[in-house]
Amino acid sequence: MAKPGDDSTLRGRRVLLVEDEVLVAMELESVLGEQGCVVVGPAPTVARAIALIGQGGPEAALLDLNLRGQSTLPVAAALNAHGVPFLIVSGYSQTQMQAPELSRAPRLAKPVDHQKLLSQLTRLLAS
């Protein structure tokens, strides 16, 4: 697994993982865990993700755009409302991600390059 050196920016940071594919969720959870992140979730449904956001605490999120056929735009809106920066991790093309709720979020395509994921997440949390 990729490790961004001795950077401890991610250690102890609470990251919400919104993903419905079990194997992808396990992979991302492992990558985050290796960096010392506290993984919130994974949330496989829009309702679960919104509930976890409402419980407070995530400092950042990884957001799949489609959970079992349901758009995660309501999750993006909730993250924006709570001031939680997020990274879109999706197989969708750029043209499918034009919603205003997603306008400021960086994007990574699946399959995810772990080094790019950690680099983007570090930038999100540093800003």
Image (cartoon, rainbow, N blue to C red):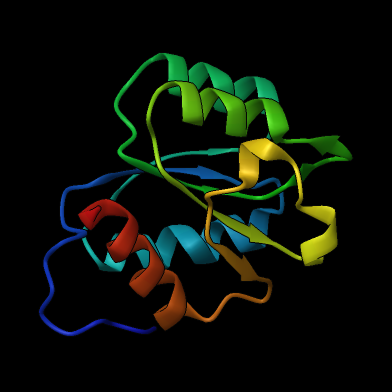
Q: 77 or 10: nearer the eye?
A: 77
Q: Residue furthest right?
A: 69
Res 92 visible: no
Q: Quadrant of the N terminus?
A: bottom left
Residue 109 picture location, percent across and down: 67, 72
How far across and how far down the image is residue 58, in percent? Answer: 34, 34
Q: Give the residue at x 53% y 81%.
A: 113
Count of numbered badges drawn on the protein:
0
Q: Nearer the viewer, residue 106 or 4?
A: 106
| Above or below for 41 versus 119 | above
Q: Is residue 87 above or below residue 73?
A: below
The x, y position of residue 47, in whole percent, is 66, 20
> Residue 97: horizontal and vertical position, in percent?
76, 52
Question: Is residue 80 found left or right of 12 in the rendered image?
Answer: right
Residue 71 sits in which quadrant? top right
Q: Which one is nearer the viewer's eye here, 28 or 119?
A: 119
In this rendering, would 59 be left or right of 68? left
- Would you say residue 79 is visible in this rendering? yes
Q: Residue at x 57, y 28 (%)?
A: 49
In the image, taking residue 85 as reference, residue 49 lies left or right, namely right
Q: Residue at x 15, y 62 (%)?
A: 9
**Residue 37 to residue 84: above or below:** below
Q: Residue at (11%, 66%) from the top-left corner? A: 8
